[in-house]
Amino acid sequence: MMRFLHLLFTTLVVWPFVGFGLSLLIPDRFETLLRRVSFGTVLVHMGLILIFAHVWIQSGAVMVNLPELVLYRHADYVFLIDLFFDHITLVYLSVGSIIASLVIFYSGHYMHRESGYKRFFNTLLFFYAGYSFLLCAGNFETLFIGWEFIGLASFLLVAFYRLRYQPVRNAVKVYTVYRIGDVGLLLAMWLSHHFWHANITFWDLSQHRWSDVYFEHHAGLATVLSIMVLVAALAKSAQFPFSSWLPRAMEGPTPSSAVFYGSLSVHLGVYLLLRTHTFWEMLPWFRWVIAGFGLLTAVVSSLIARVQSTIKGQIAYSSSAQIGLIFVEVAAGWESLALAHFAVNALLRTYQLLISPSVVGYLIRDQFYRFKPRSQRMSQPEWLVRLQNRVYWWSLMEWNLDQVVFRGLLWPVKQGNRLRGWVTSVNFLMGGLAWLAGIIIFTKLGFGPTITAEWESFLSMGSGLWAVMAVTWAYNERENAFHAWCLLGLANLLMLPLVGLSQELTIREIEIYLGGIIPAWTGGALILSKLRQYEGRRLDLQGFKGWIQPNPMAGFLFLLCALGLTGFPVTTTFLGEDLLLSHISEGDYGKALLLSITFVLNGIAVIRLYARLFLGHYTKTMQHSTPLTI
């Protein structure tokens, strides 16, 4: 029975990826076939969930942990694709399959003859595959793979109308917030490894003996780990102060808003807290922190929702407010109530978003029924009117949450632009390469004197700071796209001395890391070179160029190269980044923070570079008889 259960579980995880692969093979013109394959994929997956749930309950409804695939093993470090199933997974998968099937059925007619019909369904299935994979993840590494899938799907769905300025701009904003949340998850992965001195699984975490024993001796580490998990959950679930990205994400088509931001993806922060609750529940003060963020979000988002001028904006902030209440329920230990609340809220928001085009007429009529004469409004006390007006004003300004996130958290990155008058990109790039070459010559090739521990620490931290500055420089680069791409490649190379000077990296580990970085960077450089020849001028980054319209294949290939450079699970870079994190010793928070910030800012800068080159409205500058060939 258990062998059949494990086989069924593996099929359950793999099937959405099979459906996504099949959808890629269908030509654009076969709308009906594409719709049926997409709907059939989700429908079959729903059937597999029901069959598995029946067998699972009959076998005693015990937790299923399935170590699926070991990608790398060294000493106490194991990079393992691990699958896990319990009642939380069952609830999330069931609700997800129901909502996805409804939305795909609805989209088949809603998106009829829409430009990008095939691309829309491909992206929906890509999201659904990543969503299912994340829910069945059995450890932080596996969960992070699904987390990255959903982040990319988010960017692609918000920027679905990729020839328009506002959707593309909002897509970059949404992806930026997701990457900020990735800092928390990356550091949580690193801290969990040092907390347990092993690659802990969620099954291990559910056995209280693991958390109880280690908590007694590592209370400080446990506190930091819990905070990192909370940061990732707040960003993913649009909680205060990250609430403002949710209505911006509604720029995509209505069906994608329903399945993605109104119902499924936005509840994954709750899922992360539920999955790790056996650990942080032993911190009573931390429960109050979770509840405090949830209550604050519920109040602020409710006020903002009441003054939104668009239906999607109202629904987005209402959903954020309800998720804030779910955070409170999770903090209180009411797990069953939180799961029921998730299911009801997800289904309600899906319904509201799908009928939102029809709601406008009802609201126009409704405003006449709620009209109050000025005499009735002025009968209130003056202090109350002033307070109402002040709250109304702040709610209308969305409590300046956009300023807090995009100007507050990213302010140090944007300040790097002030130094550009002193040092050019070329000089900064050459200086970084000289720094890297000097380290290799004097420390690895044996041409220099013996370096003390203090000098090792200085050189490694200097490499990390230079990497952060290189990514910052690339983020602010506007004059030359190739210079920005070179700076991003330099930042990735500088990660090696940051870790490798104090912790010996094996040749195989370096090969794994560079085996993804070098091909991805080289491919992107070749595409940029071809584009420069095609356009006949230097590639600047002033505004959005929209070059994906005349060169769709170049845009697709450059996106793959960009993802490979950021550590997305399409190259070995993803495994290499995790290996670098695992080599940072316990308590070395400076290096861990520099490494995580570089990886996260690298992802933001790369997507920003891709968006400015290939998305937006295309304006011809030359007459080309043939499209670009790669």
Image (tube, rainbow, N blue to C red):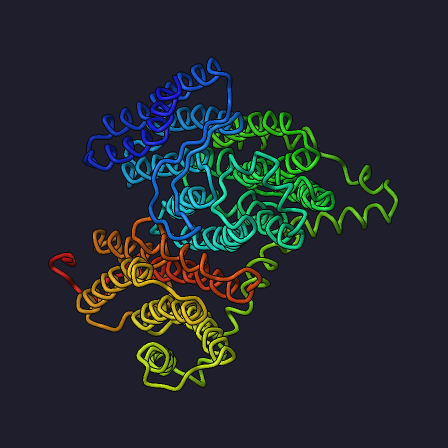
Q: Nearer the viewer, residue 157 or 207?
A: 207
Quadrant for residue 253, please give it: top left
List x then y, in percent, for residue 582.
Answer: 45, 56
Q: Residue at x 30, y 63 (%)?
A: 507
User: Would you place residue 78 above or below residue 426 in this image?
Assistant: above
The extreme left residue here reads 625
Q: Quadrant of the C terminus?
A: bottom left
Answer yes or no: is residue 483 visible.
yes
List x then y, in percent, for residue 163.
Answer: 33, 51
Q: Nearer the viewer, residue 336 or 405?
A: 336
Q: Residue at x 38, y 68 (%)?
A: 496
Left/right placement of residue 469 relative to residue 535 reads right
Q: Quadrant of the N terminus?
A: top left
Q: Nearer the viewer, residue 309 or 278?
A: 278
Left/right placement of residue 394 relative to residue 346 reads right
List x then y, in percent, for residue 386.
Answer: 81, 50
